[in-house]
Amino acid sequence: MTKKILIFSVAYRPFIGGAEVAVEEITKRLAASGFSFDLLTVNLDGCQKRQENIDGVNIFRMGKGSLGKLFFPFSAFFLARRLHKKNHYDATWAIMANYAGFAALFFKIFEPTVPFILTLQEGDPLAEIKRKVWFVSPLFKMIFRRADSVTAISDYLARWGKKMGAKNVKIVPNGVDIKNFQFPISNFQKDEFRKKLGFEKDDVILVTTGRLVKKNGVEDIIAALKFLPEKVKLLIVGIGELEESLKSKVQSYPPEADQPGAGKLQNRVRFVGFVQPEKLPEYLWASDIFVRPSLSEGLGNSFIEAMAAGLPIIGTPVGGIPDFLFDPSSRLNLGSSERFNLYGQTGLFCEPNNPQGIAEKVKLLLTDNSFRQKIITNAQKLVAEKYNWNLLAQNIGKIIANLTK
């Protein structure tokens, strides 16, 4: 018998980040296993269809922009009650303890027999989240306490969930579709793609992907180029509120004659804007090292994708990153000793807000090719065994099935 699940998610296609990709990948797989999904979301730009079906998921959009988000807990709750009378949902599923969490909480209060699943995907600093919800703090905590099951994408978020009062917390990370990131292009194709991007065959390309926001530390990567040889270039994939500011900084960085990377940075940095998810692997394959010196991170899907694509990664020991980045050579290492024993070193840690530290890690990868290759091999093994969407979708399916027996 088909299990009917109602999802609350503030954003969805075409506005996608790690959380939205997770919903899409999981629902796609579970739809073939006896589940059906309706999804309530905000019409963020006001230009999307109010109702449509994407990959078997019935999408209902409401409101518009910031106001739409603000009123989503109420508009989604009222629509959910109407839909429930017709569809008799077996469970609700909130993606993050934000506006979606409040909508699911209100539904739970009025429909207490319908199981409520909460997934923690938060990537912003927890102190920032606390600041935003201080005036409704008791109600916010109730989201965690009234959820029948809480899943978290990292140990970091699982600990937060328990601290907020959640009783039944399981870690189910985000993942990647492994087959999309396996290396299918020849060296010739790689060189041609690099040429299209404006890079030379012998350039060393650092790549960073994701939203151009403060927490992702893109400005620090740009600044790190000043400590690296001129053949080291930077490819920036993504859009965000800091895009114009970052472009302006690249244009205005003064050359420093005493540094190895002296010269105009605009000749070394490429902004490619938004890239469709299915095209992302090409940009990773064209690159040499993935860098993201995050200030906060729920898990860090971009890292997992880069690891699957065969790139060595450089990141900071914040949030959920130590779940998959193990660097025993660093005093910053916070990774699981059990997983390290299984997989070995999977990347390099750098400090947040430290461009020179990033440069030092890049140099280490450039001077020791066997070390670099070892990291890549270990990371790909870890991703294949722990961050495979097929496995993760099964885990979510089991959680829903157990709640709806």
Image: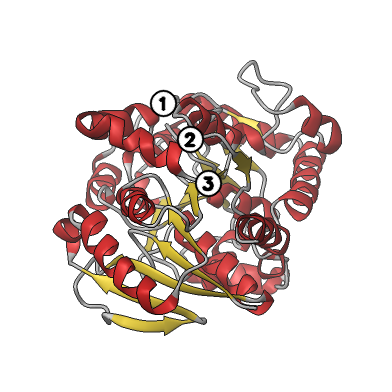
From mark 2 to mark 3, how far is it between C-alphas? 35 Å
Image x and y of residue 393, in percent: 65, 62
Which coloring applies here?
A: secondary structure
For the point 31% across and 54% down, the residue is 103
Q: Which mark is residue 148?
A: 3
Q: Is residue 34 above or below residue 176?
A: below
Identify residue for label 1. 353
For the point 81% across and 41% down, the residue is 374
Q: Spot the residue most to the right.
A: 342
Amino acid under disc 2: Pro
Q: Is residue 283 visible?
A: yes
Q: Disc 1 on helix, strand or loop? A: loop
Side of 405 relative to 370 (left or right) = left
Q: Disc 3 on helix, strand or loop? A: loop
From mark 3 to mark 1, how far is it between C-alphas? 39 Å
Q: Which mark is residue 293?
A: 2
Q: Is residue 245 above or below residue 392?
A: above
Q: Are marks 2 and 1 in contact (CB under 8 Å)?
A: yes
Q: Nearer the viewer, mark 2 or mark 3?
A: 3
Side of 278 relative to 101 (left or right) = right
Q: Nearer the viewer, residue 175 or 149?
A: 149
Q: Nearer the viewer, mark 3 or mark 1?
A: 3
Q: Are marks 3 and 1 in contact (CB under 8 Å)?
A: no
Amino acid under disc 3: Asp
Local packing at callout 1 (Cα closer than 10 Å; few below 14, some 14-19, many 20+) is some
Q: Earlier in the sequence, mark 2 or mark 1?
A: 2
Toward which corner of the image does residue 325 lie, by quadrant? top right
Image x and y of residue 350, in percent: 55, 27
Q: Nearer the viewer, residue 243 or 66?
A: 66
Q: Earlier in the sequence, mark 3 or mark 1?
A: 3
